[in-house]
Image (spheres, rainbow, N blue to C red):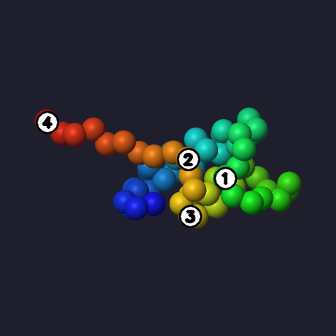
Amino acid sequence: MTKKNSKYEKARMVSARAFQLAVNAPPEVSVSPSDEPLDVATKEYYEDKLPLKVVHKKKR
């Protein structure tokens, strides 16, 4: 990711993506049939191919 995410943001993004993969969303990286959704989501995160982003609200 271009901006370093906190460990909480990373955990939320990877878990949300793993859920999407578990309900048959197409993966953004090459995978084998035996790969678990959490492993695929983590691989997508580290290869910067995770189709999710964190949006921070501006402070007033």
**Which of disc 3 and disc 1 is earlier in sequence?**
1
Question: For residue 46, which numbered disc appears in the image?
Answer: 3
Residue closest to the eye, 50 or 37: 50
Which is more foreground, mark 4 or mark 2? 2
Question: CA separation, marks 4 and 2?
Answer: 29 Å
Question: CA separation, marks 2 and 3?
Answer: 12 Å
Q: Residue at x 44, y 56 (%)?
A: 7
Q: Residue at x 76, y 38 (%)?
A: 24
* Labels 2 & 1 near each other (Cβ < 8 A): yes
Q: Residue at x 77, y 59 (%)?
A: 31
Q: Tag 4: residue type?
A: Arg
**Which of disc 3 and disc 4 is earlier in sequence?**
3
Task: Give coordinates of residue 49: x percent, y percent.
Answer: 57, 56
* Labels 1 & 4 near each other (Cβ < 8 A): no
Where disc 3 sits, the SS reads helix
Residue closest to the eye, 15 or 57: 57
Q: Which residue is mark 1?
A: 28
Which is more foreground, mark 1 or mark 4? 1
**Which of disc 3 and disc 2 is earlier in sequence?**
3
Q: Residues within 10 Å of mark 2 (few under 14, many from 20)?
A: few
- Considering every residue shown, the one lying at the far right of the view is 33
Task: Give coordinates of residue 60: x percent, y percent.
Answer: 13, 36
Q: Which residue is mark 4?
A: 60
Question: CA separation, marks 1 and 3?
Answer: 12 Å
**Which of disc 1 and disc 2 is earlier in sequence?**
1
Above or below 36: residue 59: above
